[in-house]
Amino acid sequence: MKRNRGEVSLAIVFFLAMMLLPLLALGGAKKQTGQGKAAPKASATQFRVKDLSTQQILTVDDEDFVTATVAAELSPEAPAEALKAQAVAARTYYGRLRQQSRASAGEESDFEVESYLTPEKMKQRWGASYDKYYAAVHGAAAATAGQVLRYDGALADTTYFAISPGQTEDAQDVWGGKCAYLVSVASPGDAFAGGYQTEAAFSDEDFRSRVLKAAPKANLSGPAESWIGTAVCTQAGTVKTVAVGGETLTGGQMRQALGLRSAAFTAQHTKDGFRFTVRGYGHGVGMSQVGAESMARQGAGYREILAWYYPGTALGA
């Protein structure tokens, strides 16, 4: 795959919807759309969470919810300051979704998650280590109780993800829009994480089938080595757009079509088909969780971590 030498100047972003994570919390959350149903009563310090795995709407106290989110997002053996940074980022992110949801009439829940991590599920996951691990994640929630990040007085859109390709992305390059605090910052510790670089291989026919589902008009009738053309990439290495069979796809579309861990990829064609080399894991915008762990191991506190990944935001109640 050829890269465009005149790459991209970095800008800034904002986007409401969650990609879904890895990577994101509690198995992937979605904002609930109104369906005219009566919502369960919940106070301003509780979350109404629809668990898609059970179709139940749970009413959960703030700090219990944050505890569950930290447990779902990071290893309980992560440094305490990284767990605290995750707690604040999650409290802010989901608090913002709750605020938006409750501003709309008829919302069934504040948002949906694929599977909410209850204490019972934590016990199944951690076994004999439950008490120790629960103390770590609950401790992070308790130590930061009530703390959120704001920008110009409003709750910040504190997106996060697993591993960057070496620096985070300007959200504008990934999603479009403009947000002053979701900008590209260095995250060098990510390069030492397990899973930082992965490979994915596809036969010509498999590649063709996957791409045509995303781009039905792509012309993949010629030699396979000519199917992928020029890519335009961000400074961090994420593919913004790439020409495939005469069609222009975004890096996100290619990532989804091929099931790649991130859109920071390069590709080559061999006699066996296409081989993709992928760096990082997730959408790349906001706080890198591995980067936060790396900073914590080097002595950074959670306030410093949050200020680094969300520059210009203010930490407070």
Image (tube, rainbow, N blue to C red):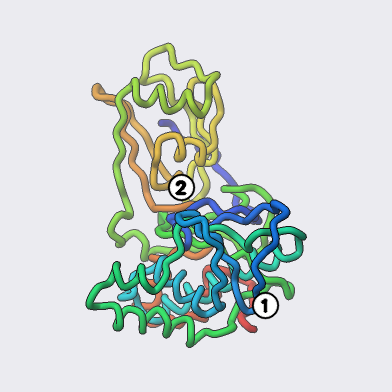
Residue 150's x, y, as percent?
A: 66, 74
* Amino acid type, mark 2: Gly
**Placement of 55 over or under 137, stated as above or below:** above
Q: Nearer the viewer, residue 85 or 309?
A: 85
Name the disc covering residue 261, or none: none
Residue at screen point 37% across, 34% down:
267
- Screen quadrant of the N terminus: top left
| Furthest residue in direction bottom, as rendered | 143
Please tell me which residue is depicted at 42% across the width and 76% down the height of the picture: 83
Tell me the distance, in whole angstroms, between the alpha carbons under discs 1 and 2.
41 Å
Task: Kindly tell me whether residue 28 is visible in this rendering.
Answer: no
Secondary element at image label 1: loop
The foreground one among 62 and 10 is 62
212 or 199, nearer to the observer: 212
Q: Quadrant of the C terminus?
A: bottom right
- Estimate the x, y position of residue 38 in percent, counting from the top left: 70, 61
Neighbourhood count class around disc 2 (C-alpha, 10 Å): few under 14, some 14–19, many 20 upward: many
The residue under label 1 is 44
Tell me the number on the disc at residue 237.
2
Give the left or right position of residue 280, taking residue 181 as reference.
left
Element type where label 2 sits in the image: loop
